[in-house]
Amino acid sequence: MLCIGIEGTAHTVGIGVVKQNNGKCSVLSNVLKIYRPEQGGIHPREAANHHTLYIADLISESVKKANVSFSEIDLISFSKGPGLGPCLRTGATAARALSLTLGKPIIGVNHCVAHLEIGRGTLSDCTDPVLLYTSGANTQVIAFAEGRYRVFGETLDIGIGNCLDKFGRTVGLDFPCGPAIEKLAINGNKYLDLPYSIKGMDIAFSGLLTAAEQYYRANKSLEDICYSIQETTFAALTEVTERAMAHTEKDEVLLGGGVAANKKLREMVQTMAKERGASFFVPTKDLCIDNGAMIAWLGVLMYKSGIRLKVEDSFIDQRFRTDMVDVTWRE
Ligand code: AMP
Ligand code: MG
């Protein structure tokens, strides 16, 4: 089965073509364009305008790069949510147009679940992981239990990526700020106290953000602040992930989302996994960030398990939660 996936939940418009091979996912193409605001955060309408501008060309490019023809495509999959309304609508509209033009079925998928499934689909031995999903807007610890992907812990306020980006903006770094903060942190060596807020299994970052900004205004070394932000936030994320692993008795951990590119975060989670005798997985970078291939792959899994969607029912859902999805494709 050949599927084209359309991603457009926030800053990225991405199109991917995948094929199912012996139950695993083979990515034939995965192309994307990222909207970068000139200043401030993401403006939903401007991001959607950006996606509208590029989406048709990206669709053609992805099909060409996959070395297939439109007539060979069996299924159209799109990000149903969660995400920004105008961006989601752009992706869904393109998906409907493709579905009607090609006369092929359409399916709408949950973006967070797609981050987990692409790990299971592309990495050998990654079968039943706890996912630490760290992106701009989303921060969740997700694992499969009793027919659903359950959220064991999540941010109560802002995502880890947003926390890094907001701090970066305050101190004048370019968006996305995570990579620059990672670089600065390498030269930091003095730990500055920051609030470590874990409530139950959930996490909050805004208090830490305010405290970090205060250090900056008090002329503390930027390198030390970046170092301390990483140490504190990543330790909290690792702690919640470990508790989810202990609770579910799972022995695999998977990273996903843009912040998973960070070496320090990888190192901490990998160390935790090693100490528990668990396996550590992280997809290739192009599959960690928001991308169309993961949307296509989840579409394949859902369609093959018997799920069908009519074009007239192909709504988007800005608040589509991970645990709302009935996971019909797993035992
Ligand atoms: P996503 O929303 O999943 O596409 O991820 C985007 C987020 O990842 C942004 O907030 C970036 O600042 C962050 N990010 C990207 N690379 C890194 C990195 N090396 N370290 C920390 N954060 C990063
Ligand atoms: Mg994402």
Image: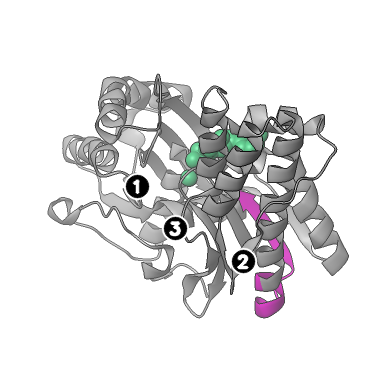
Task: Tell us which disc is closer to us: 2 or 3.
Answer: 2
Q: Is residue 137 visible?
A: yes
SS class, disc 2: strand
Looking at the image, tell me whether mark 2 or mark 3 is earlier in sequence order.
2
Which span of residues is magenta-colored?
244-257
Of all residues, the one furthest to the left in this rendering is 312
On screen, residue 311 above or below 72: below
Q: Nearer the viewer, residue 75 or 258?
A: 258
On screen, residue 100 above or below 252: above
Find disc 2 in the rendering and name its residue. Answer: 198
Task: Tell us which disc is closer to us: 3 or 1.
Answer: 1
Find disc 3 in the rendering and name its residue. Answer: 301
Q: Nearer the viewer, residue 76 or 224?
A: 224
Of all residues, the one furthest to the front in this rendering is 218
C-alpha distance separating marks 3 and 1: 22 Å
User: Residue 264: percent from the left, percent from the top?
Assistant: 76, 42
User: Residue 271: percent from the left, percent from the top?
Assistant: 84, 55
Q: Is residue 286 visible?
A: no
C-alpha distance separating marks 2 and 3: 34 Å
The amino acid type, in three-letter code, at marker 2 is Ile
The amino acid type, in three-letter code, at marker 1 is Gly
Label 2 crowd bin: few (<14), some (14–19), many (20+), radius 10 Å: some
Quadrant position of residue 85: top left
SS class, disc 1: loop
On screen, residue 44 above or below 122: above
The amino acid type, in three-letter code, at marker 3 is Leu
